[in-house]
Amino acid sequence: MNNNWKNHLISQGAEINENGCSHFGNPESEKTAALQGHVLCDLSHYGLIRVSGVEAESFLQNQFCNDVHRVNPALSQLNGYCTPKGRVLALFRLFQHGDDYLLRLPREILEPTLKRLRMFVLMSKVTLEDDSNAQVSLGYSGPEAAKHLTDILGGAPAAIDECLHTEALSVIRVRGPHPRFEIHGDEAAVRELWGALSAQARPAGGDAWALLDIHAGLPEVVAATQEAFVPQMLNLPALDALSFQKGCYPGQEIVARMHYLGKLKRRMYRAHANTDDCPQPGDNLFTASTKSGQGAGKVVQAQTSPTGGVDLLAVIGIASMEQHSLHLHDADGPALTPQDLPYITEEVE
């Protein structure tokens, strides 16, 4: 974490852990504010990989599962990096900053992702570097978030995935129950923006932002879930994060075969469980008939809800979901109650 930014957060009352800001004193109250009002969230649990060079676009196009050619200064995208077997290693937001590309992804998988990408640079005119400490990231969400940003910056992205750039900031609109924005940029400029927005919003940690991701149906891939899912299981087609028309990339043949010839047996669902024991990414789900050790699904991410219990996203067997009897931890564990996703999950070409 940028040291100046860390000191700023501490001065605002933040509790800092190894992933960034965990909360500002009352995490459940912060989550209530996230779902109902305006929050200003530290996003230091994310890191940034900068990709530069005259062949950066073609290099990334050959590595990732979405069509990088569609990215431009005004449009970001969700994208994924797969193994040759079609399993997702990383899921990230890709956007342009000047002539360079930036990948925003969880810090815990940044280093292995960067190392793997560098293996394939070979003779390409491409440079990849960890840009995490050179920039600062925050999130802003709320019913009037777009207006607040417009009042300060002179504008705000109107549609999901759209970007607005100032001299020192990149503002990206992302899915959420309210207008929601990621902001990346120079530490001094982000700190100034934080000060301007703090009169309108409650400061919050990364867990509040993750809860908004869950309600938006946005998956995250962390160390515990790398290689656990193919892109379709994470609803990437519905999130415009997977292209079936682009050229080859690692795992493309398997992903395409699933789309054109196979039948998807698992996909991501949103659910709630009445328990105080919050599951972790990668934890298994079970049905009453599930054999011991054979999970019916796997948690993608989960957060305690300010109204009680746990909200989560999980990849679940479609047949198991139809049984309406899913449980955390084991066949006798807390039952899951399905919740609607804010988008249609059928695959699109």
Image (cartoon, grey):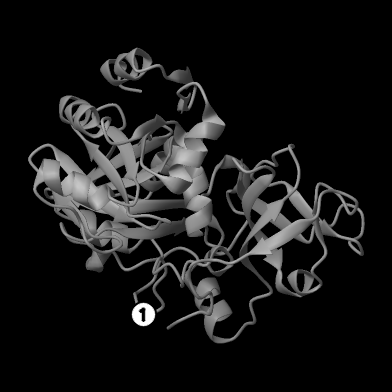
Apparent side of residue 196 relative to residue 314 in the rendered image (left or right): left
Between 184 and 160, the residue placed more toward the observer is: 160
Q: Quadrant of residue 304?
A: top right
- Are there few (<14), some (14-19), or many (20+) residues within 10 Å of tag 1? few
Secondary element at image label 1: loop
The number of numbered badges drawn on the structure is 1
Q: Is residue 288 visible?
A: yes
Q: Quadrant of the N terminus?
A: top left
Apparent side of residue 190 relative to residue 321 in the rendered image (left or right): left
Residue picked out by circle 1: 245
Q: Quadrant of the C terminus?
A: bottom left
Q: Residue at x 33, y 13 (%)?
A: 11
Q: Residue at x 67, y 41 (%)?
A: 280
Q: Is residue 53 visible?
A: no
* Residue 209, percent from left and from top: 45, 42
Q: Residue at x 31, y 68 (%)?
A: 67
Between 23 and 124, the residue placed more toward the observer is: 23
Which amino acid, by three-letter code, is at mark 1?
Gln
* Residue 348, percent from left and from top: 45, 81
Q: Is residue 41 above or below residue 10?
A: below
Between 103 and 119, the residue placed more toward the observer is: 103
Apparent side of residue 314 relative to residue 89 in the rendered image (left or right): right
Q: Is residue 191 above or below residue 99?
A: above
Q: Residue at x 44, y 56 (%)?
A: 81
* Residue 122, percent from left and from top: 30, 49
Between 102 and 11, the residue placed more toward the observer is: 11
* Residue 331, percent from left and from top: 89, 54
